[in-house]
Amino acid sequence: MITASFASEAADLPVVVREQPSLQALSTAPSEAELRATIEKLVSFGTRHTLSDTKSDTRGIGAARRWVKSRFEQISKECGGCIEVVTPSQVFTGKRVPQPTEVMDVVAIKRGKGDPKRVIVMTGHIDSRVTDVMNATSDAPGANDDASGVAALMEAARILSKQNNDATLVFAALSGEEQGLYGGKVLADYATAQGWQVQADLNNDIVGNSHGQNGVLDNTTVRVFSEGTKTNETAEQAKYRAYHGGEVDSPSRNIARYMEQMAATYMPDLRVRMVYRTDRYSRGGDQVPFLEAGYPAVRVTEGHEDYTRQHQDLRTADGIHYGDTVDGVDFRYLARVTALNTITMAALGRAPAPPSGVTTEGALATDTTVHWKKVPGASGYVVHWRDTVAPQWQHRRAVGNVDQAVIKDVVIDDWFFGVSAVSADGYESPVVFPGDAGSFERSPAAKSQ
């Protein structure tokens, strides 16, 4: 009778988040040899400028795209056809594209088994450039910017092709980034047309160098940039947020926090430095078109950049080697950043969707009540709270498979609150901040466009 009673009580306990041995295994899964082979192959095409040759089999953006496509197809073959490869494209004309030019992405899609419309995306850009952004003929190796990001997503695809995923995983090698972030727009538009519920875009751009131009050597830090407020929030939403909070709690920001926690749990030798900006100062990346389309997105970038190796003609001047060549890539560091992305995608893809409809109440009360809507695949929920100036969630309480909870003696005035969903086997979604400011659903401003 004692045993039976104990079992009954244990069955009634809320599900809890668990460390996952399978995620721990992914922390050492990326192969430096695979990453090197991919970068060296991409560099071998001479230039991958968006306006370069598309017909040659050995030089230019066309040859590079076809090789990436063939590599994705080989990965799919090795997993019994588990990956679909598509090549969405659009024709653009703009300031850096003077003549109508087709911009094509190469996209590998591994469908989710339980929640296929929910999509986790990892991106990097194939195209490269030299000093003159319109120079489409000179050699532009682009080893770090951004063959490193493409190598990382292709290696993540190779590893995760052999893993289970409830949500759909997408690995996208984009074109046109240097000419105006066109590849990101192509993929964001494709996601919208396909009805994807994009939970996150992890945009990896310049992720392979551990030597800063200032002489700093740091192979243990990676930066994750995230917007604080949604790019396309309405004036009404902004007014509500300005009074109730949410300036640092967009879904993108909570993806960054999620990545920081993944690193802290599974990769103690790699520190995620969260940066409260959409991108580096006055610069941009392919995560921006996702944000403009109303989808959560972050930018992943090495901790210290060397600008002598970015957007430079190949040359030596005053003893300084200029140009983005393979010798500037630290493959062990790149493998660690790749592992972080792989773990994050796996965790997001196995966890339930983030809760929707999160709200809080507690004015003129000493307790705070949190409400949310249940999501498929969740066996329980966790309420989180933190000091309003704290960068990371500080307190958590597992509350069971319910749709509201009262947090006793925690005054709503002094704290920020959020909710995450947990699967029966202990995978947790990102935390959702209350209201439109924190919702992972596609931004209402985008829906009306």
Image (cartoon, grey):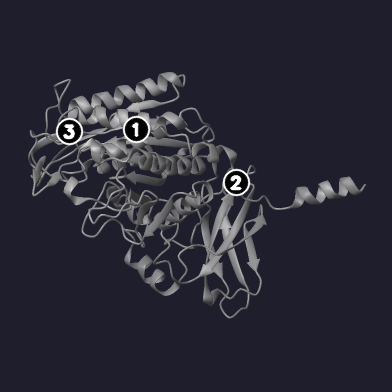
Residue beneath disc 1: 35
Tell me the element at label 1: helix
Q: Which of the numbered marks, if any, corresponds to residue 48?
A: 3
- Mark 3 Cα-neighbour bin, 10 Å: few <14, some 14–19, many ≥20: many
Residue 341 location (% of width, % of height): 42, 42
Q: Is residue 22 left or right of residue 289?
A: right
Mark 1 touches mark 3? (CB < 8 Å)? no
Q: Residue at x 31, y 42 (%)?
A: 208
Residue 212 location (% of width, % of height): 26, 52
Residue 327 location (% of width, % of height): 24, 37
Residue positioned most to the right: 1
Instruction: Measure the alpha-carbon separation of dots 1 and 3.
Output: 18 Å
- Residue kind at label 2, given as amino acid type: Glu
Residue beneath disc 2: 19
- Residue kind at label 3, given as amino acid type: Arg
Q: Residue at x 27, y 32 (%)?
A: 39
Q: Residue at x 33, y 56 (%)?
A: 445
Residue 139 visible in the displayed image: yes
- Residue kind at label 1, given as amino acid type: Leu
Residue in front for this viewpoint, 362 or 317: 317
Residue in front for this viewpoint, 420 or 18: 18
Q: Is residue 283 left or right of residue 93?
A: right
